[in-house]
């Protein structure tokens, strides 16, 4: 009898340690994201539009504050370069198509910039997933261990990673009346929901303003399942997959990631020697 009690007690200790480990890993991940001031990486994306998926890839350089971004697209439309500097060029991105076509200035929220993308280029990086995890962690409170599960260590393309899985019950949807004129992006940020998901659910075709009194259908949460592959060295979520009631909604993979590189003073300018602007 004492043997069975001891085994049960040890099992309870192991479960407790797993829960504590998940909290420790989440805390370290959020701290690493906060300490990430710049990055250089290859990004691969897979996003659902209707019942089909769109895939993309590119090489990027990013500075967090003030936000600066350089991207050379690899697919689709290989060779397109995008350069953005917060507070400069009327806050527009410079888009440089390959070939003889001249570079043009585009709003980061324009239809051309957002086509076949769930997010604006301003959302690239780890800040969105950090905000989502912080909100989720605060929401579940003492029930953290019921929703956050740390799996075995896995290898992701040569990177030793923790697999963190965050789950909830099936998504619910509510009716929401817009109380005052608001930009779609601001509404999504306020509710911490996917901007694209709001558009898809409500047949919205513009990224502009939603008028007061508009009736919308909104999901009660961003997602009901998140899978994060957290690099054991950097504690950054190098692979992020989010699911809804239809399956995979979006996946982002950060490859060949360099954290806090020292960029040259002109590296976010069109005249930088390695660019073709």
Image: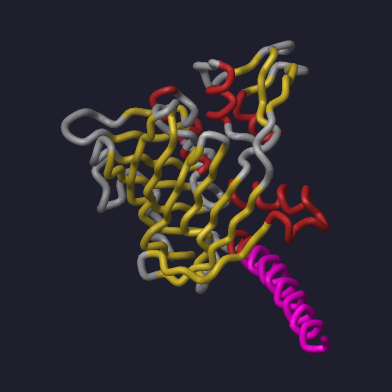
- Comparing 54 with 245, the one in front is 245
Left or right: 141 as drawn, with respect to 63: right
Which residue is at a point 45% across and 48% down the rendered structure image? 252
- Comparing 39 with 226, the one in front is 226
- Comparing 171 with 269, the one in front is 171
Look at the picture and state if 60 lies above or below 76.
below
Q: Is residue 79 magenta?
A: no
Residue 212 picture location, percent across and down: 72, 13
Residue 241 picture location, percent across and down: 50, 49
Q: Is residue 5 magenta?
A: yes
Which residue is at a point 47% across and 59% down the rendered structure image? 238
Residue 82 picture location, percent across and down: 36, 39
Q: Quadrant of the C terminus?
A: top left
Image coloring type: secondary structure
Question: In the rendered structure, which segment of residues is drawn in magenta?
Answer: 1-28
Which residue is at a point 47% across and 56% down the rendered structure image? 239
Look at the picture and state if 43 lies above or below 122.
below
Residue at the bottom extreme, as displayed: 2
Give the quarter of the image for residue 5. Answer: bottom right
């Amino acid at each position: 009898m004492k043997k069975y009690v001891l085994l049960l007690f040890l099992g309870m200790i192991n479960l407790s340690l797993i829960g504590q480990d998940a909290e420790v890993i989440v805390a370290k991940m959020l701290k690493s994201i906060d300490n990430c001031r710049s990055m250089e990486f290859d990004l691969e994306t897979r996003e659902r539009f209707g019942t089909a998926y769109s895939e993309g890839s590119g090489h990027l350089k990013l500075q967090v504050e003030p936000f600066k971004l350089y991207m050379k697209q690899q697919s689709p439309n290989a060779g397109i370069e995008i350069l953005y500097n917060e507070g400069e060029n009327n806050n527009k991105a410079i888009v440089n198509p390959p070939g003889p076509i001249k570079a043009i200035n585009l709003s980061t929220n324009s239809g051309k910039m957002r086509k076949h993308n769930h997010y604006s280029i301003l959302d690239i990086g780890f800040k969105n997933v950090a905000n989502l995890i912080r909100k989720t962690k605060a929401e579940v409170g003492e029930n953290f261990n019921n929703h956050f599960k740390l799996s075995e260590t896995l290898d992701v393309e040569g990177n030793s990673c923790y697999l963190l899985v965050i789950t909830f019950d099936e998504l619910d949807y509510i009716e929401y009346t817009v109380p005052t004129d608001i930009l779609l992006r601001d509404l999504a940020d306020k509710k911490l929901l996917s901007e694209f998901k709001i558009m898809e659910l409500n047949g919205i075709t513009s990224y502009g303003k939603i008028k007061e009194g508009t009736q919308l259908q909104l999901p009660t949460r961003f997602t009901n399942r998140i899978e994060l592959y957290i690099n054991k060295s950097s504690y950054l979520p190098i692979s992020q997959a989010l699911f809804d009631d239809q399956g995979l909604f979006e996946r982002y993979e950060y490859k060949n990631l360099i954290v806090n590189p020292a960029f040259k003073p002109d590296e976010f300018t069109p005249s930088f020697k390695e660019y073709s602007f």
